[in-house]
Amino acid sequence: MRTTSDGRNGNRCSSRRRKPGVDRLSKLPDSVLLHILSFLPIEDAIGTEVLSKRWKSLWTYSPSLIFRQYIYDDDPEDERPISHDTYTEEWIVLEDRNFVAFVDKTLLLSNCSKVDKLEFDFQYKPCLASKVDLWARFAAVKGTEELHLLFHDENIYADENRRYELPQHLFTNSLFRELNFRNCRVNPKGNIGWKSLKKLSIGEVRLSNELLEKILLSSPVLEMLELYWYEGFSRLHVNNASLKKLILRSYQGPTPTYEEDEAEAEHNNEEADAENDNGEDEAEAGGAHGAAEDAADGGNALEGDLSDGENPAEEDEADDWHGFDPEGLDILAPHLHSLEISGRLAWNCQLINVSSLVDAKLACNLKSDGGEEDVMRIQNELGGLLSSFAHVKSLAVGTWAMRVSLPTILFHCD
């Protein structure tokens, strides 16, 4: 028998080295493998077919189907899902018909009797409404408990009619435990029956005071409410004892339509042309002396703008997006434990009753033209919010809010 220099059996070591590896993953029960697949986008789950015969059709029994339309630049490896922080005009979107065909085929091949989670994250167009209706019906038939309808529109000022309107059967489905809607029309024509709903996220949707109140009253066990890029309401009164967490991200406020922008731009151009024509006529009539005075006046005006460090175009843009809302936003949530306010904040936001609050996060900002009055007003706004957090055990303040409201924070610390 061959031995090594240290006396060990060489054949035994050699055979141990040649022993093939054990596929421990494939030995796991189907329930565990399906749980693993449920965390993957569906195209990745389908890709596991090549692993072995056992994996060939395993994905068709997955209880989670996640469809995300990907966009990419010149490098196909640098693909990413469409998201709120990526401008679609900078990317090439995969052809809509390919994405729709892929979704249709995948849903047809699904063998799972109950699909717990369905997510559709893609660039929506009105011509796809009938398709989305079928997908929503699929969710109802399969007893889906978690539904995400995340729509994107390359026209950020899209008309309300371009958005997908949620079908009425979604509002009466009592099986839902988690819902996430983005950039669609929420218009229940009857009662809402979300008796099992625990988490609700709504973004880029205009919500009236009445609609928001109706949703809250119809969700008796709701625990978490998230509103992002929100607008349309001035009060948020939450009396649900079950609701413990509220997230507000980026107040939107009214935004102009393309038609308004184009009409205003055309009107401004006509006025500018008229002024230029008048200026030319006056310059010709007044001679060289008048032209010299006009040039001097123009130079002085430009010098004044530069000395103030302001750009008229930037100032106009700030006025359009300063976020001022005369009605403000009143928040009354006596049972709330956690509150997070981030992104752009509506003016006149007041916390009327958050007596049960334990932790809070304030990482917001207020748009202004930088004037002294605005600075004082912003400090007062943030100071009012911070005073409402005086009793919380944990408070996180963002960099901008900290810098602006530092005098107020120091005052309350004393």
Image (tube, grey):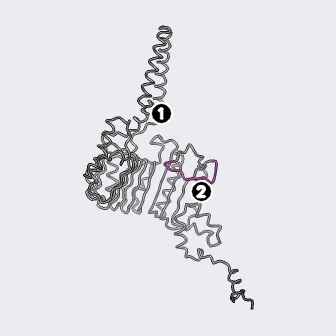
294, 232: nearer the viewer: 294
Question: Tag 2: residue type?
Answer: Phe
**Could you tell me how far apart the alpha carbons at marks 1 and 2 are, in whole angstroms?**
35 Å
Q: Main secondary structure of the magenta part?
A: loop
Q: Position of residue 282 (x, y in %)?
A: 47, 11
| Residue corresponding to mark 2 | 102
- For the point 30% across and 44% down, the residue is 381
Report whether 167 appears left or right of 406.
right
Query: Is 412 rendered above or below residue 9?
Result: above
| Residue 384 drawn at (x, y percent) | 28, 47
Is residue 77 rendered magenta in the image? yes
Q: Residue furthest right?
A: 2
- Against 226, residue 110 (above or below) is below
Mark in the foreground, 1 or 2: 1
Q: Secondary structure at mark 1?
A: helix
Residue 385 relative to residue 308: left or right: left
Q: Residue 172, which numbered label?
A: none
Look at mark 1 in the image and give the residue it sits on: 259
Q: In this rendering, is residue 59 above or below 185?
A: below
In the rendered structure, which amino acid carries the disc numbered 1? Glu
Front residue of this view, candidates 87 and 386: 386
Q: Is 42 colored magenta in this rendering?
A: no
Q: Is residue 141 left or right of residue 411?
A: right
Contact flag, marks 1 and 2 (Cβ < 8 Å): no
Q: Tag 2's secondary structure?
A: helix
Q: Which residues are magenta?
A: 74-85
Q: Is residue 347 above or below residue 293?
A: below
